[in-house]
Structures are given as structure tokens and as C-alpha cells.
Amino acid sequence: MNTEPKKLLLAALAGETLSRPPIWLMRQAGRYLAEYRAVRAKAGSFLKLCYTPELAAEVTLQPIRRFGFDASILFADILLLPNAMGQKLDYREGEGPVLEPIRSLEALKALGEPDIHATLSPVYETVRLLRRDLPADCTLIGFAGAPWTVATYMVEGRGGNDQAAAKTWAYQDPDGFQVLIDRLVTATIDYLSRQIEAGAEVVQLFDTWAGVLPEADFRRWCVEPARRIVLGLREKHPAVPVIAFPRGAGANYPLFAEFVQGLSLDTSVPLAWAASALQRKLAVQGNLDPRYLVAGGATMRREILRLLNNLGHGPYIFNLGHGIVPETPPDHVAALVNTVKMWQR
Ligand code: CP3
């Protein structure tokens, strides 16, 4: 008989209200940690770090050792998938990701249809190493970018805050843009399935730029692709929960509630509304402003307690409203984890 206690993250995603919520943080591995910067320097480039399983597993484990998070997120990047689909990718210091832009159906077809797993197999190996090395009570999260957000980078060709090129394509030629989204849906189901088969216990879909679309486009380019990915995963892996992070979705957050198990809330979502409109139906995650983690001290503590007291009485996963920023003092992260672990409903 299996007498192992359920991992906290899996219990919360099954809809349980716990005596204290599990905690993990988006971008918990990264430049704010000296030990990450050392491994990153040894790897030589960010992409080499992502594609070298021993090093990627090591940086994934660093924040687990240091802070004792309840969950661990695979170290990789959402842009590895377009890279595997044939698009050239580079990360430049101070500039972020740079891709060869794809602005039309012809440019998309010119990529051909390479076997994505040929490029992505080191990621699956990282997952296997992590399942071997993680503490027994720590849940392993796999992830991918949501099609809309990945498409914004593929079409624009770089990071930053500009989704103009993707919008122009989507609005001028929706049928052509749909071909790109459909290819991303299929590839994302394959990619996440392989992560699950290698040992990922939960998967999260990052839709960083969901909040820039008008209602009808939001449904077409964010909600429907996410629904198709979840249904595709459910066919093969019905027990694996999915968390969606449609950043900036605002009053449209409830559209996801019928098909995912967890919703990750950005910083702007009001807590009382989240408790009544979302948490009655599924687990919510979030939404501490990462800048409170930079500020630290009594003001951070007050904000953490506001979150715990508002959302801690239903299925809840403590997290940020967006990723950790590089200037975050690690001591503040330790204080956050301590406050959450000491809290009792
Ligand atoms: O959360 C984790 O610890 C897991 C690893 C992870 C990374 N990126 C590592 C990374 C995850 C889950 C992501 C997701 C990701 N990547 C998103 C969605 C979430 C979000 O933050 O909005 C997006 C939009 C990307 C694309 C991306 N990758 C950008 C725009 C950049 C440059 C900006 C930056 O922070 O430098 C990256 C690079 C990146 N991805 C870094 C890390 C640790 C920094 C690279 C470095 O070490 O120099």
C-alpha cells in the first residue's frame, strides 16, 4: 500500500486546502543567485546551459537546496521549442533572446518540419536527472510557453515588450497565423508529453503576453490553444495537472477555469475576486509582486500575510505574480519561504 503522504503541490492542485500552502517561485533559478552565475559562466552561454543536462539539473537544484521550496521547475526556456522547430535562436547579453523573424506562411514553411525531439532530448534527460536527485517531498514541474506568447517572439524576432508584428499578422491574415498557432499546439503537446514521460509531475503553460489582446482574439489565440493542449495531454496523461499563467487576463481568467487544475495570477488580480470567482472552482497560484521581494522587510511581510490570509483558506499555491528579478536579495527569498512555512490556517 502506498502510505507516502501526498506532495503538497499535488494536493493543492487536487483541490485540497492545506494547513499551509506549498511554495515555489517563477524564475527561482537564475541570476540573483551567485551559484547560478558561476554555473552559467562555466556553461559559456545560456543556450549551452539549457542543453547540457548535468548543468541544467544543477541550477534547477540550487534554489531547492538553499531555500527548501516545495516544488522545482525544470530549468529551460520557452524559446527552446521554436529553436527545435528550426528557428535560429541566440541570447545576447543585455538584449535577451534574438530569433530570425518569421512574418508569413512562406517563412514558416521554409523552416521545414524537423524532428523537435532531436534538439529537445537533452531537456528530457534533465527531467530524468531531476527525478533521481530531487528530495522525495519536492514536486517536479515541467513547462512550455503558450502558443500566443511563443508566436510573439517567433514573429517579432526578439524579446522586449513589442507584440506588434504578431498582432499585425494575426489581424491581417488570421488563417495564415492559425497555421503557426496550430503547429505550436501540436509541438507543445508532444514536448510536454515527453517531459511528463521523463518524470514531470505537473506542467505549467506560460502565456506572458495574454493580456495584450482584445476579447475575441484572446479567446482565439490564448484560450482555445490552451484548451487544445490540455485536452491533448489529458488523452495520454489524464492524471497530470496543468497550471495556466495567462498574465494580464484580468476578468477573462475564469475562461480557463473549466479545463485547467491551477491558475497562476499576475500581481494585478484582486484577491477577494480571485477567492470568489476562481478559487471555488480550482487552485490558484500567485501573486506577490516580485518588487516586494526586492523591497523585503516589514512591508514584504505584511504583503505576504495579506496573500496568505486572503487565499490560504482555499486551494492555494504561494508564488509571485511574475518571475524573480535579478536584483532580488537571496535573504529576502529565505525570509519569504520562512514566513509561508510558519503560517498556519
Ligand atoms: O522559472 C525557472 O526558474 C525556470 C526557468 C525559466 C527560464 N525562463 C529561464 C531563463 C522559465 C520557466 C522561463 C520562461 C520564460 N522565458 C518566459 C515566460 C515567463 C516570463 O518570464 O514571462 C519567457 C517570456 C521567456 C523568454 C526569455 N528568456 C526572455 C524574454 C529572456 C530574457 C530576459 C531575461 O530575464 O534575461 C530569457 C532568458 C532567461 N530564461 C534567463 C533565465 C534564467 C536569463 C538568462 C541568463 O542567465 O542570462
Image (cartoon, helix red, strand yellow):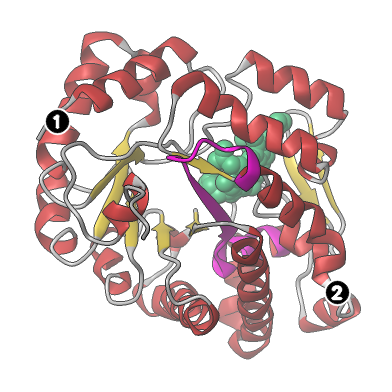
Q: Is residue 228 above or below residue 6?
A: below
Residue at x-position 28% and y-position 62%? 14
Q: Is residue 92 above or below residue 98?
A: above
Q: Amino acid at mark 1?
A: Arg
Q: Which residue is mark 2?
A: 115
How far from the left and from the top, in percent, is residue 224?
45, 81
Quadrant in which residue 200 is drawn: bottom right
Q: Which residue is at the front of the view, 112 or 312?
A: 312
Residue at x-position 22% and y-position 60%? 15
Residue at x-position 28% and y-position 67%? 252
Does the magenta portion include 141? yes
> Which class describes the residues within 10 Å of circle 1: few (<14), some (14-19), or many (20+)?
some
Which numbered dot is residue 306? 1
On whether ligand 1 comes within 8 Å of the CB at mark 2, the answer is: no
- Can residue 345 be seen? yes
How far from the left and from the top, in percent, is residue 278?
19, 61
How far from the left and from the top, in percent, is residue 272?
9, 48
Magenta residues span 131-154
> Which class describes the residues within 10 Å of circle 2: few (<14), some (14-19), or many (20+)?
few
